[in-house]
Amino acid sequence: MNLKAILSLTTATLVFGTAALAEGTHPVTGEALSDNQTFNYLQLDQFPSVDPQLVEETIGSAIARDLFEGLLIQDADGNLIPGVATSYEASNSNKTYTFTLRPEAKWSNGDPVTAHDFVYAWQRAVNPETASPYGWYMELTSIVNAAEILAGDMDPSELGVKALDDHTLEVQLTKPLPYFPAMTTYATMMPVHQATVEEFGSKWTDPENIVSNGAYVLTDVVLNEYNTREKNPMYWDADNVIIEKTTGHIINDANAGLTRYKAGEIDLTDELPPGQYPNLLAEMPDEAHSVPRLCSYYYTFNFRPDSKPELQDVRVRKALSYAIDRNVIVDQILKGGQWPAYNFAHRATAGFEMPEIDYAGWTQAERDAKAKELMEEAGVEDLEVKLIYNTSESHKAIATIVSQMWKQKLGVETTLENYEWKTYLGIRKDGKFDVARGAWCADYNEASTFLDLLTSNNGNNDGKWSNAEYDDLIEASTTSDNPNEMYTKAEKILADDMALAPIYHYTNAFLLKPDVKGWPYNNAERNWYSKDLYRVAE
């Protein structure tokens, strides 16, 4: 694929756009623009990091997309469009990718963005000293020597990426990977400014130190309250960035968020009180939206050797999963158009063929009966489990109803524990749970982004489930002409061993002020960029 044609169209728009903005109208639609070009949104939790090589979750990723720009980005429909790279070419049977970088790209301090910045960032991502929680993602890209470097067997300088010159980046893969370009949109593969990282160390992303290459710069962070990024005048397309300032307000109470939305303090909230979407749609039809989102909600079991013995019995795990009435959760609690899930990969994933999972076709009464039968077979009585989740009204409501289902149907006693986001991530990673709430959102639009999570060496496989046959299938899928065949077999292994309990496939139900335009409703990954938004005059 070559993006030169796309870039030509984009450049034409830019020439037109600069003049149009000066007249107070949108360069493409001609809409009159508001004098207020700020955007305020609900941010559920404090981000653990905005360092691209340390980001591991959706909140930090959203901010990183504003602050840093990778080789490629996405449009409103989720299609790849030029970022720092104006074009790329695949050769050597999709094992060599050569990216051409735009010469006008600059860092926020005025330094040019070069291919060397990407080499440094990617080497940093695989360097064991960085301890990147997404190091496994770099291995997943199949870049030459990534796995060996992460294992500590090779030096980061031997990663299969090099700058042929300041504006040409060459990447060597160990195997053909046609979706590699899409993987470059994720934060881990964004560039960082080497001199700044080396000067300030762990403090380099503080507002007073950070140097970034995206459409915005980080100007203020008040822990657990808000963070602000403002328009970057050095961004190559700054003349066409309309939103001047974006602020994420940390609000982990859905009702408080709704109150502040209605008061006009925030323009976007996608943390709605459980079950309120239908009422909000009726009340505010121009502001309430529900669209597919490539995320899967699940409960993970702890498979560590020192974990609760009963959970090592597949019959017990199946019983707990079968007893969850997913229709009650999506139809009576969430009410946002979500789909009950009996497999892991999201049903809307591009090219993915939904597998036939046996228990998905049963009635809930049949699942409940089988759950009781399995618990009796396992000889398990008086089971007590600890279920952890991060602070959210929806997570609390789901955990509460699931604990009631387990109690009423199986006699299982459940202790519920909730934690703020950063603490929760640490507890889950340390394995201090029996069952943990989880959600996986696609890093790129292909089923492997979900299914790779359960491979034995994946850094985000917090339950530590491991299955050699599963690992082999996912590995084989990367070079298969028909990967869906492997994906189907892999999903059936997950269901047969109940590696996790899928609960629902996401939609994104949210409220957005009607004067905010440019929202990417058709981007199923929910990758939004403040630079694409704008406010129209009332």
Image: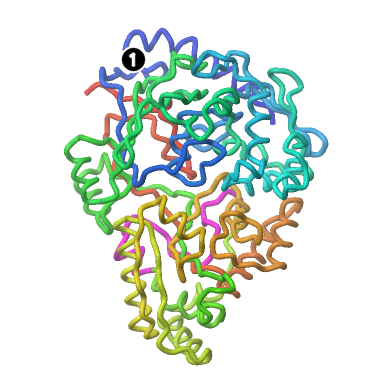
Near-viewer residue (283 or 440): 440
Circle 1 Cα neighbour tier, 10 Å, few/some/many (<14 / 14–19 / ≥20) = some
Identify the image's colour scheme: rainbow, by chain, secondary structure or one colour.
Answer: rainbow
Give above or below for 254 relative to 389: above
> Looking at the image, can residue 523 be seen?
yes
Q: Secondary structure at mark 1?
A: loop
Which residue lies at the image location 56% right of the left edge and 28% below the top edge?
197
Give above or below for 446 relative to 8: below
Q: Quadrant of the C terminus?
A: top left
**Residue 537 placement: quadrant:** top left
- Across the whole image, how many numbered discs are drawn on residues? 1
Q: In the displayed structure, does residue 351 sit left or right of residue 322?
A: right
Near-viewer residue (323 or 105): 105
Q: In the displayed structure, does residue 345 sit left or right of residue 507?
A: right
Residue 423 rendering spot, x and y as whole percentages: 41, 54
Q: In the displayed structure, does residue 274 sit left or right of residue 159?
A: left
Range of residues picked out in magenta:
327-351
Tell me the amino acid under the disc marked 1: Thr
Magenta stretch: includes residue 303:
no
> Looking at the image, can residue 81 be seen?
no
**Residue 275 placement: quadrant:** bottom left
**Mark 1 highlights which residue?**
25
Taking the view exactly as shown, the residue that stands out farthest to the right is 92
Q: Quadrant of the N terminus?
A: top right
Residue 335 rendering spot, x and y as whole percentages: 31, 59
Which residue lies at the image location 56% right of the left edge and 55% below the top edge?
460
Residue 105 rendering spot, x and y as whole percentages: 57, 17
Give above or below for 273 relative to 488: above
Near-viewer residue (351 or 223): 223
Near-viewer residue (415 or 449): 415
Residue 129 rendering spot, x and y as whole percentages: 63, 42
Which residue lies at the image location 53% right of the left edge and 89% below the top edge?
378
